[in-house]
Amino acid sequence: MEGADALDLTDLVTGCYGEGYGVAVTAEALRRIQRRDLADGLVGDDASGRTRDLTADITAPSPAELFVTRHRLALIQRVRGVAALLDRLEAGGVLTAEEVAAVAAGATPQDRMRRLLATAPAWGRRGHGQFLQAMRCLQPCLMEDLEAEEEGEELGGSGPSPPHPKAPQDLWTPPS
């Protein structure tokens, strides 16, 4: 850590502790080295003079984190190409080789996705963004479905639209 610059140190702290708790750990470390001015810089005053926690913006989940959380079940059930996804996340620095091996040891694609998503709290904003980018590239149809579902919810929809009345399954009748 002695040779690390500010960005490397930030990545290290957030990778180990997560964004919210990482701020608390950093503040405590600064206090212990008598840099209360920097530790107190993590907390500021709002216009009314009351102390405002600046970590609230950091700890609020990003849209990518919310997306992964909301669609966890669908991701587990529908993603099949987990190995390619793991390769991209490892290349992007989101996962370590050990994490990739642990996830790849899952017996089924669903088990591998469960293991992968269990590591999600440590990814941070950048990692969640890379996950979604990889998913859009590797699983475009699934991502279109999930994103369309989200848009429908935002517009007040209550789920998928009903099939068209003249859909092929409605025209075919089984033989008697």
Image (spheres, rainbow, N blue to C red):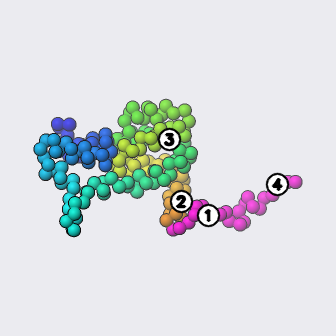
- Residue 149 disc label: 2
Q: Is residue 99 left or right of residue 143?
A: left
Q: Which residue is mark 3?
A: 113
* Sooner in the amino-acid sequence: mark 1 or mark 2: 2
- Residue 161 disc label: 1
Quarter occupied by the C terminus:
bottom right
Q: Nearer the viewer, mark 1 or mark 4?
A: 1
Residue 12 percent across, percent down from the top left? 27, 41
| Residue 23 colored in magenta in the image | no
* Sooner in the amino-acid sequence: mark 1 or mark 4: 1
Residue 158 percent across, percent down from the top left? 57, 64
Q: CA distance from mark 4 to mark 3?
A: 38 Å
Q: Residues within 10 Å of mark 4 (few under 14, many from 20)?
A: few
- Residues in magenta? 155-176
Residue at image location 53% in from the left, 37% down from the top: 111
Element assignment for label 3: helix
Q: CA distance from mark 1 to mark 2?
A: 10 Å
69 or 165: which is nearer to us? 69
Q: Residues within 10 Å of mark 1 (few under 14, many from 20)?
A: few
Q: Image quadrant of residue 100?
A: top left
Q: CA distance from mark 3 to mark 1?
A: 28 Å
Disc 3 marks which amino acid?
Met
Above or below 167: residue 22: above
Q: Which residue is mark 4?
A: 174
Disc 2 marks which amino acid?
Glu
* Sooner in the amino-acid sequence: mark 4 or mark 2: 2
The answer to whether marks 4 and 3 mark residues whose Cβ atoms lie closer than 8 Å is: no
Q: CA distance from mark 4 to mark 2?
A: 32 Å
Q: CA distance from mark 1 to mark 4?
A: 25 Å
* Sooner in the amino-acid sequence: mark 3 or mark 1: 3
The answer to whether marks 4 and 2 mark residues whose Cβ atoms lie closer than 8 Å is: no
